[in-house]
Image (cartoon, rainbow, N blue to C red):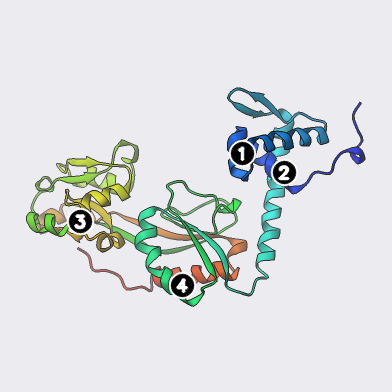
Amino acid sequence: MQRTSAARRALQWDDVRLFLALCRARTVGSAAATLGIDASTVSRRLAAIEEAMDASLFDRGRDGVAPTRAAEDLLPIAEEIEQAMMRFTSAAEGIEREVAGPVRVTCPADVAEAVVVPFLRELLERHPGLRITLDPGEALLDLTRREADLALRTARPTRGDLLVTRLRSVRWVAAASPEVARELGTLRAWSDAPWVGWGERLSTIGPARWLETFARGAEPVVRSDSLRVQLSVLSSGVGVGLVPEPSVAHYGLVPVKIGASLRESAAEWPSDELFLVAHRALRDVPRVRVLWDLLVERLGERAPTRKKT
């Protein structure tokens, strides 16, 4: 016999968080890691939730857990609760007056090193109470779920309640170590230089397509789908590669001279758009706003543009 609603244990926000973590991770261990608790606690709390609801939410198997039909029906409601809690938390944080506390920024590693790091000393001298976390992972953290506070991205997000501002275009240019650039002199043919390029997994990104389309004969001697690895290879004195302009000097590289006729035979250097992103509800939280404003000031279109190579 089913218990009445009054007889059931009242569900808490932490129960909803656990439910969502299991729906997304599909294993108890991964859900536990997301929540910062151990797997046995997840299993125990899930059993308590199912008992309170008098319903089975997940089928357990050797490969993990699978949501039941009941869980699938509840998932959209749980996600609405999650969004409401985020709005509540953000509104509470917006009451802050002091510029202090944690700010997590996610961006590619090369962007963190060449673009964000140069501003940190000034930022922390102005606001010593800030605690910055830089997450240079390749994965795109979800700002709508508060996995990060700010993001620098080269693609404009199209989903979620996010505030997005375009900072500027970032050109890619042919660059090498000073020694390699000096030895090569002026390139008259793309095949005159050993190249560092991308593997098959990232062969469709802009710079890789540019090399394939316009720099025929530029056969890479080293390939890597990690730009950071490519930059390290170039810095070690191996080959020529396409490099984002902000990273050229940062990695001790210099632009390679390209002959006029060769340069005219190709399109403009490839470029990316750099976007600054935050959850709309966090934009005016003081600790987030100061970093947002500094990045816009230093990286926006008002900053001096570089001459073409």
Query: In what element is the residue under mark 1?
Result: helix
Query: Which of pointers 3 and 1 indicates the residue nearer the eye?
Result: 1
Q: For the residue labelled by badge 4, is the local secondary structure a helix, a strand or a loop? A: helix
Q: Amino acid at mark 3?
A: Ala
Q: Which tag is nearer the camera, tag 3 or tag 2?
A: 2
Name the secondary structure under disc 2. Answer: helix
Q: Earlier in the sequence, mark 3 or mark 2?
A: 2
Separation (CA) of disc 3 from disc 2:
51 Å
C-alpha span from label 1 to label 2? 12 Å
- Provide the residue designation for mark 4: 123
Residue positioned most to the top: 62
Q: Quadrant of the C terminus?
A: bottom left
Q: Are marks 3 and 1 in contact (CB under 8 Å)?
A: no
Residue at image coords 32%, 73%: 304
- In front: 266, or 9? 9
Work out whether mark 2 precedes mark 4 in sequence or the reverse, and give the earlier one: 2
Confirm or deny contact between disc 3 and disc 2 (CB under 8 A).
no
Residue sitting at x 25%, y 60%: 248
Q: Earlier in the sequence, mark 4 or mark 3?
A: 4
Quadrant position of the N terminus in the picture: top right
Checking the image for residue 16, the label placed there is 2
- Give the residue pinned by disc 1: 31
Residue 37 in percent (x, y) is at 64, 43
Where is residue 52? Give x, y as percent.
Answer: 82, 36
Mark 2: amino acid:
Val
